[in-house]
Image (cartoon, grey):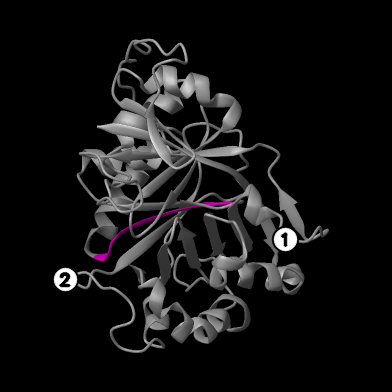
């Protein structure tokens, strides 16, 4: 398989809920008027705590300086596993559990922190730019490494990359952060960019002005709904993750649906904000799911991580993860 190193230099930032109105103009421009910017990589995810933005340097220029905007200090690069060639965003998704043991675990074993963004189309593994030489060294024995330069994909064969490190022996990776599973059911979907103008007003309402599904006081409890919505526009491809009830607000045949109409349940990882320096959080979750052959989407945010698994698998997922959790205590 091929590992593509995309050319976008990315910033990861948090917008406080009380400050979202300051950034709304820039965010609307990034989401709905891409021709007015030079941005090629934009993602906005709302959680109960804040909004997380992943955006390239061109897009970041659209955001105002504000005390409500917190930016992770590192510059990040996006990696993408592609099976059988083709472009990263248009290829069939590999799935985070399918790359758990070939990408995520080896990076964790070599103390490389990752930030995940799964979309309807594919999975992006974000690594700090300064970690790229170690990333390439770690993964070069498993993948053909390719780098996107000025839109062209070229082989990485002149950067001193060797045959990679010796594979470490598989070790159990205990889960050390609390897990919770809200009661929402989610859809992972997309839409044709040509239809975006027809639902732009609705999407703006969902993203910025609507309370969405009503949240009980204990919104972060296992039994409660939580506010979670994710919109990505990356290299012309749109991805949406939203509560199943919210999809009913959209006109028929606008949102893409799978043949099975699959719904997803969420596992939220973290009791306190996770930070960016700890290694292995994604591996702790994705490896047990890979072992059980359970597909998953994984979305990291500024404060917490989120895994989405098929609705019918949620009880076995929670059981497997909690078993792994208890062995580490």
**At x 48% / y 82%, what residue is drawn?**
197
Residue 39, can we see it? Answer: yes
Q: What residue do we see at 34% from left, 69% from top?
A: 189
Does residue 172 lie above or below 199 as drawn?
above
Q: Inspect this view and state whether residue 212 appears.
A: no
Quadrant in the picture for the N terminus: top left
Q: Given contact means CB atoms under 8 Å apart, are the residues at marks 2 and 1 in contact?
A: no
Which picture quadrant has residue 37? bottom right
In this rendering, position of residue 92 left or right of residue 248: left
Q: Nearer the viewer, residue 141 or 59?
A: 59
The percent coordinates of residue 163 (x first, y second) are 34, 11
Q: Tell me residue 275's x, y (percent).
A: 63, 42
Q: Secondary structure at mark 2?
A: loop
Q: Which mark is residue 63?
A: 1
Q: Nearer the viewer, mark 2 or mark 1?
A: 1
Question: Which SS does the magenta portion mostly show?
Answer: strand
- Horizontal relation, residue 212 to residue 240: left or right: right
Q: Which residues are magenta?
A: 303-311
Q: Position of residue 323 (x, y in %)?
A: 33, 42
Q: Residues within 10 Å of mark 1 (few under 14, many from 20)?
A: some
- Mark 1: secondary structure: loop
Which residue is at 72% across, 60% downward? 63
Badge 2 local density, few (<14 within 10 Å), some, or many (20+)? few
- Residue at image mark 2: 259
């Amino acid at each position: 398989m091929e590992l593509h190193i995309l050319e976008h230099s990315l910033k990861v930032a948090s917008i406080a809920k009380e400050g979202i109105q300051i950034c709304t103009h820039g965010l609307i421009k990034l989401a709905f008027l891409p021709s007015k910017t030079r941005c090629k990589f934009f993602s906005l995810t709302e959680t109960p705590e804040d909004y997380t933005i992943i955006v390239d340097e061109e897009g970041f220029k659209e955001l105002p300086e504000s005390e409500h905007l917190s930016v992770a200090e590192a510059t990040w690069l996006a990696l993408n596993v592609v099976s059988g060639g083709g472009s990263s965003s248009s290829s069939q998704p590999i799935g985070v559990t399918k790359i758990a043991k070939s990408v995520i675990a080896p990076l964790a074993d070599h103390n490389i922190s990752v930030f995940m963004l799964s979309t309807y189309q594919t999975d992006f593994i974000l690594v700090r730019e300064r970690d790229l030489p170690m990333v390439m060294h770690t993964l070069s024995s498993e993948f053909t490494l390719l780098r996107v330069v000025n839109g062209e994909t070229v082989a990485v064969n002149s950067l001193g990359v060797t045959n990679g490190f010796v594979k470490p022996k598989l070790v159990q990776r205990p889960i050390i952060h609390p897990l919770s599973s809200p009661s929402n059911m989610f859809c992972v979907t997309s839409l044709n960019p040509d239809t975006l103008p027809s639902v732009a007003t609705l999407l703006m309402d969902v993203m910025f002005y609507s309370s969405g599904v009503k949240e009980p006081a204990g919104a972060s409890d296992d039994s409660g709904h939580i506010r979670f919505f994710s919109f990505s526009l990356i290299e012309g491809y749109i991805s949406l993750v939203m509560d199943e009830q919210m999809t009913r607000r959209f006109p028929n045949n606008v949102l893409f649906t799978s043949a099975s109409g699959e719904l997803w349940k969420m596992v939220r990882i973290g009791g306190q904000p996770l930070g960016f320096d700890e290694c292995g959080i994604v591996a702790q979750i994705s490896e047990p799911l890979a072992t059980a052959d359970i597909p998953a989407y994984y979305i990291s945010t500024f404060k917490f991580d989120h895994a989405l698994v098929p609705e019918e698998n949620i009880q076995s997922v929670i059981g497997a993860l909690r078993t792994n959790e208890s062995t580490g205590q």
